[in-house]
Image (cartoon, grey):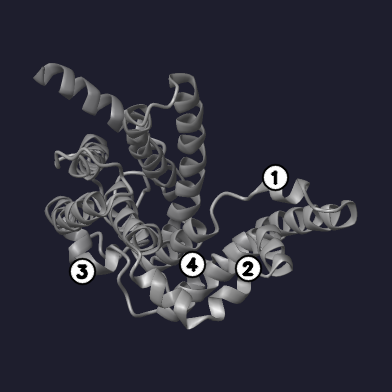
Amino acid sequence: MVSILQRWDLFMRVWSAGMASEMTTEQHPAAVDAGGTIYLSPIVSVGACFVISIIYVASLYVWNSKHDRDHPSTIKRRFFSVFVVMLVAPFFVLTLTSKEVFQRYTMWQIMGFRKEGLFTATFLPLLLTMVLFLGPLSVQLSNGIWRIYSEPMYWMNAMRNLVWLRNHLVAPLSEEFTFRACMLPLLLQTFRPSVAMLITPLLFGLAHLHHIKERLQNGRPLREVLVVSFFQFFYTTIFGIYSAHLFVRSGHFVAPFVVHAFCNHMGFPDVQEVQSQPHRKKYLFIGFYVLGLIGWIMLLPTLTTSTWYSNNLFWASDL
């Protein structure tokens, strides 16, 4: 077993050699060791991230309950579980991070909790994501749904609704903290940002496959469960790439957290609602969908420029 792990570690080192950032002392003053590099073994960084993701998913099932995921008792227990995970996960960053990194940055800084650029990181990624959702937002503007957001009772009822709190606060908070703030600082000590931003989304997407068990328990056909679960894996992985991109470029936890909460609120675009619109209005909404996507693609490189967020963390020079 030890021999297999040694060979795997050797393979990962060779594979990452072309991908890992060459963080020289000139590029990063924090790198002051003999080799002039900040480096974490791939088997350690990837292995730690895998363990963290297992702990997160397992924490949701430690409770023996006959209720579904939307039952108040299930939600409350899972709230407690993920908050415990949020207490445990930072210890991986604390114990595994290179000492050369800690000579220049605190643990909380590399996890994205910084004052510099905080205001920009709170609003600019949200604005960028709203451009992407220009189509769905135009539909809401047209049918008047947006008016409920100006009603105080909407927010009062939302704050008492456990499902709403889970979807808009606890899930984005715990998932971004675990899969972005705790995993990416480890991976970025091994891989270039472009590679690290692809690893956590895969773990993020795989972590959502646990819903297969719940859907089967609810009596849904196996074929339907597999199709729905694969689609969920696909779009959560795509979102994970975007979320990791925001974290790496901004160096802030708040950027992916706010965007995650907004995306959970909007949900997946309702194409059927667009198709049901009158002929003229339908093509107008389709135009907004296309315009939003094009605008997002064009604005993405500019609005995620690392200097706008005062990102001087150890991976910033590789962006």
SS under mark 1:
helix
Q: Earlier in the sequence, mark 3 or mark 2?
A: 3
Q: How far is disc 3 from disc 2 in space, using C-alphas?
A: 44 Å
Answer left or right for 87 relative to 57.
Answer: left
How far is mark 1 from mark 4, CA to CA?
38 Å
Residue identifier under label 3: 106
Q: Position of residue 138 (x, y in %)?
A: 71, 64
| Eye-nearest disc, 1 or 3 | 1
Q: CA distance from mark 2 to mark 4?
A: 35 Å
The disc placed on residue 145 is 2
Residue tagged 4? 306
- Dot 2 falls on a residue whose secondary structure is helix
The amino acid sitting under disc 2 is Ile
Return the disc, 1 or 2, that comes first in the chain's sequence. 2
Q: What residue is rendered at 39% in x and 77% in y? A: 156
Mark 1 and mark 3: Cα distance apart in space:
48 Å
Relative placement, left or right, of 211 versus 143 is left
Amino acid type at circle 3 is Thr
**Which residue, given by chain and number where applicable, does mark 1 sit on?**
272
